[in-house]
Image (cartoon, rainbow, N blue to C red):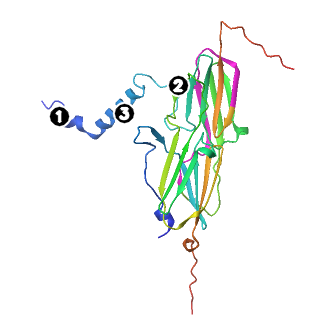
Amino acid sequence: MTVSKEIAETQDKPVAQTRAGEFVLQPPVDISEDADGITLTADMPGVSGDRLDIQLDKDTLVIEGTAKIEMPEGMKPIYADVRSTRYRRSFAVGGGLDPDNVEASLKDGVLNLRLHKRPEAKPRKIEVCTE
Amino acid sequence: MFGIPVNFEGSLFDQFRRIEQQMDELFGGGGVLPGIRSVAPGTFPPVNVGATPDKVDVYLFCPGIDTQKLDVSIQQNMLSISGERKAANAENTKFYRRERFNGEFRRVVTLPNDIDPDRVEAKYADGVLQIEVQRREASKPRQIEIKQ
């Protein structure tokens, strides 16, 4: 089975609730695939590198982050589209990805993840012999 | 003779409507009409507005933006922000999900009436655009900046 068929979202709600009752934001993502691996781009505004946590084991990819928004003391909210500072999103991944070969970069609140395929999981072109 | 069907209240649409009403009550939306410049929920970029007695802060959650392409302007108490975010189009890739915003955007935020449109500052960090608008204080003498 290819990785693409196995990559499935574990949760599909825009906002999930943790056990503690705090809302968690699900960052919107773009996911694409080419011959070498999978690229995931996620919008996580307010998150810097030190407040970002990415975990990939053989089954699951978990992206977590906490946004830090500079706010003066005693500020009263007038209007809020964003009601949490915590982001989390997880995906089920197939065994074709190499957990030791992941590149991640974060710029202006956009996370770019590059998950490489194991050599044996890369597509092979099969030559058809004709007599 | 027939009256109102008894099981009408239990219909799916009715349940949806009831949930919607409860959500409105919960988040304070009940009875407040949306502004003529308000946008549909989920519109990019999300905006938060907070106020202190001295200033009003507007936060726009717009990651991955080229600040050169951002246009922030203020007219009386109306702050408008427009910009563009273009998705990178790589060749030979297949997309499974494209949830991230792509294109042009514009949002207008109506601020309290006592703001000073001459004292506005904007900064962009980690994908959050923060616009600080100072409020007028009638009791305090107004400071005049001397330009060189």
The subunit carrying tag 1 is: B
Residue under label 2: A77
Q: Is residue A18 left or right of residue A3?
A: left
The residue nearer to you, when weighing A56 against A11, is: A56
* Apparent side of residue B1 relative to residue A37 in the rendered image (left or right): left
Q: Secondary structure at mark 3?
A: helix
Residue B61: x and y in percent read 59, 37
Mark 1: few/some/many CA within 10 Å (<14, 14-19, 20+): few
- The quadrant of the image that shows the C terminus of chain B is top right
Residue for badge 3: B20
Report, in whole angstroms, how far the alpha carbon at label 3 lies from the one at label 1.
Answer: 22 Å
Between marks 3 and 1 in the image, the one whose residue lies nearer the viewer:
3
Secondary structure of residue under mark 2: strand
Quadrant of the rendered image containing residue A108: top right
| Amino acid at pointer 1 | Val
- Of circles 1 and 2, the one toward us is 2
Q: Which residue is mark 1?
A: B6
Which span is picked out in magenta? B97-122
Closer to the N terminus: mark 3 or mark 1?
A: 1
Name which residue type carries label 2.
Answer: Pro
